[in-house]
Image (cartoon, coloured by chain):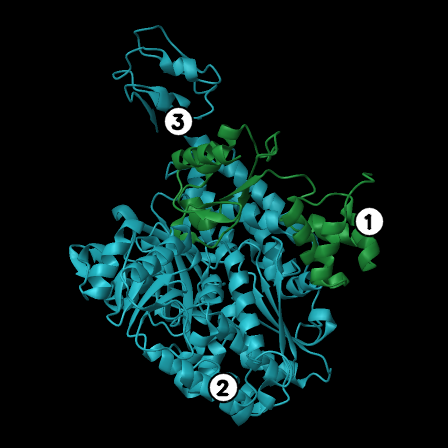
Amino acid sequence: MNQTFDFTVVDGIIDGLGRKPSAIIAILQGIQEHYRYLPREVFPYLAGELGISEARIYSSATFYENFSLEPKGKFVIKVCDGTACHVRKSIPILERLRKDLGLSDKKATTEDLSFTVETVSCLGACGLAPVITVNDKVYPAMTPDKATELLKALKEEL
Amino acid sequence: MLKTRDDLINVRSVYGKSLGLQTKKILVCAGTGCVSSGALEIFDRLTEILKEKKVICSVTLEKEPHGTSVGMKKSGCHGFCEMGPLIRIEPQGWLYTRIQLADCEEIVERTIIAGEHMERLAYQKDGKVYKKQDDIPFYKKQTRTVLDHCGQIDATSINEYFAIGGYAALEKALFEMSPDDIVDEISESNLRGRGGGGFPTGRKWSQVKRQKEAKKYVVCNGDEGDPGAFMDRSIMEGDPHRMLEGMMIAGLACGASEGYIYVRAEYPMAVSRLKAAIEQATQYGLLGDNILGTGFSFRLHINRGAGAFVCGEGSALTASIEGKRGMPRVKPPRTVEQGLFDKPTVLNNVETYANVPLIITNGAAWYKQVGPENSPGTKAFALTGNIENTGLIEVPMGTALKEIIFDVGGGMRDGRKFKAVQIGGPSGGCLTKEHMDLPLDFDSLKKAGAMIGSGGLVVMDENTCMVEVARFFMNFTQNESCGKCVPCREGTKRMLAILERIVEGKGEEGDIDLLLELADTISSTALCGLGKSAAFPVVSTIKYFRDEYEAHIFEKRCPTGNCQKLKVIEIEAALCKGCSKCSRVCPVNAITGKVKEPFIIDQAKCIKCGACITACPFQAIMEK
């Protein structure tokens, strides 16, 4: 266990949302937004603060797809594979992104923690299918070539 | 702070007057779709140019404006996402499409200052130019009542909602109706839940109202998880106050003083608009204690989902709000008896709540004028897929499928033939050519083996492989199965395995029967709606496209040429120059031959990756 973990951020999030068990999902979301994942150290700490078991927190954290116990990349790229995007060929875009970044369905994040590539079931922007998002910014009407271009631009921002 | 009924009437008239002084308006669509195509930059640029040209414009609705001005507004989704970014020009009602930053200056000079129409920005189809938004076929055939504010008013401003008569329904409910009157009016209107099930809303409310518990809750299901559906998102983003008003009326009718809105995590803009709307309503005293001095108190909270489709199911949703794993539980007790925090709970979907103020203001008789007797009103659909006009539409319940696809949707893309439409997402079924005249309402769809679901309509053309579509949905449901009950957890896995086998060309005789048997078992024994309906897409594709399944299984052939593993890649000997490029790129060394002579692909080794097709400089390699 990392003894030096600083809980100031976590305390701030708890104070903002209320020190009650029902706020746990919102608290975890806040932590995930800050660290881009859920550091293991927060589980025993939250259990103590909210007066619920670590197992209960862990069960919520592992149930929901948005939570990650592994660090994610600086740019989280979500390829929409909802029905509308799927029938307008979203998979070739996913394959191109993975190929360009050396990722696969087993390995979602690059070694240097720059990029994470994952799929999402529907972003609700079906009128512009196929879409991808990078850290919640929506990019409409994508193609594999546009995806490669986008990666180039993002790499310059790193 | 509004303390009395008169205060509310007054604020409505103040801002109504202010809105009247905005003789010209530019409404920039600020829905997720247009924003991703650059609508906010366009908004800023237009405002900047107006100021440069010394045109008096107002970005917000002022309480005491000094005179007329051009109103700049961020509106909700117009629904015509395909043509975005969109702007609407008032008072003419013109719609400009696909606006670029470079167009802004001309728009201000020619349209706003000189009042000219710019033909090049108007929507054009088959050589015809459509000036007015309402004349465009996509809009003309629609009946926009629930969505009528989307695209017409500033979605981010409560004052603008006041200006067009906002919170009049709440006012009527508070001062002129008893809780019984409200429930009776809703029951009388025959409003049915727009989340998919079609349960009568009035009956639900009266069941909650009957409960003796002191603490009750109103919950709004904004966990629009069906892939291909975004109606609720558009309402939450484009007209948040109408939905809040509906929830407050529900609270008043059922005796609840607290409400929760559960929004899926993928809709960040909906969350921020709702948050802002709640803050505005609270500042005005329309949320909080002793609302307008009536003694009625109501508070609203927002919960963001965390990425679990199953949370769209009532008991899973309430569990998630409580901070637990979003797993459904056995019913009874039902949500109306023991819902959120084990208290009686009214749980309706976004669109249902958005209908409520309309019914209260105009009365049940007015509401029932549209749509069939047993499911009146309108329904919003998200029209997507291989169709010409994708976007958000609203039509009367009971509109025939062909009107939606051909009149509103403009027919198929690229002149291809219509094959099927998937309705209701992964829990729905597909409709085919034979259903073209079928009226889309709760009961007739149920009879046809499909369901309205949340209202996603994904249109598929002749090039879509229906077996692959079924596999796609099963993969989705399998991923989203929460794992609590065995039929869903294991059954969907087995069905998916069979479907994967079939699309890979490894299907066996008896697979279709096995799929149907599994489907029957899962549907009759699963715990919640997700499991019960998980097999619907498979059953309905087998029903209408059995021949496609059989071609995959017995002939090892995909009739639409979609299934990668069933493709045959061949070199056309007459076109091959023997350059050997293909054999060098083949990752499995399946291509051999002598230089300057035609090469050959060893079909046993080929993994159909298609690398050789891309590499061939003579287009001599083809998929068959």
**Tell me, what hue is chain A?**
green
The chain drawn cyan is chain what? B
Query: Quick check: can you spot residue B523?
Result: no
| Alpha-carbon span between mark 3 and mark 1 | 56 Å
Three-letter amino acid code of the residue under disc 2: Leu
Tag 3–tag 1 contact (CB < 8 Å): no
3 or 2: mark nearer the eye: 2
Image position of B308 with respect to B200: above or below: above
Of the numbered discs in the image, which one, if any, rests on residue B8? Answer: 2
Q: Of residues B411 and B143, which is closer to you in this image? A: B143
Q: Chain of mark 3?
A: B
Tag 3–tag 2 contact (CB < 8 Å): no
Residue B160, picture quadrant: bottom left
| Alpha-carbon span between mark 1 and mark 2 | 50 Å
Confirm whether circles 3 and 1 share one chain. Answer: no
Confirm whether circles 1 and 2 share one chain. Answer: no
Q: Dot 3 corresponds to which residue?
A: B568
Three-letter amino acid code of the residue under disc 1: Pro
Identify the residue at horizontal 83%, vertical 40% (top origin).
A3
Point out the image quarter for the N terminus of chain A.
Answer: top right
Q: Chain of mark 2?
A: B
Instruction: State the SS at label 3.
Output: loop
Instruction: State the SS at label 2.
Output: helix
Mark 1 Cα-neighbour bin, 10 Å: few <14, some 14–19, many ≥20: some
Mark 2 Cα-neighbour bin, 10 Å: few <14, some 14–19, many ≥20: many
Of the numbered discs in the image, which one, if any, rests on residue B171? Answer: none
Residue B339 percent coordinates (x, y): 69, 71
Of the numbered discs in the image, which one, if any, rests on residue A44? Answer: 1
Q: Is residue B7 left or right of residue B287?
A: left
Q: Residue furthest left?
A: B127
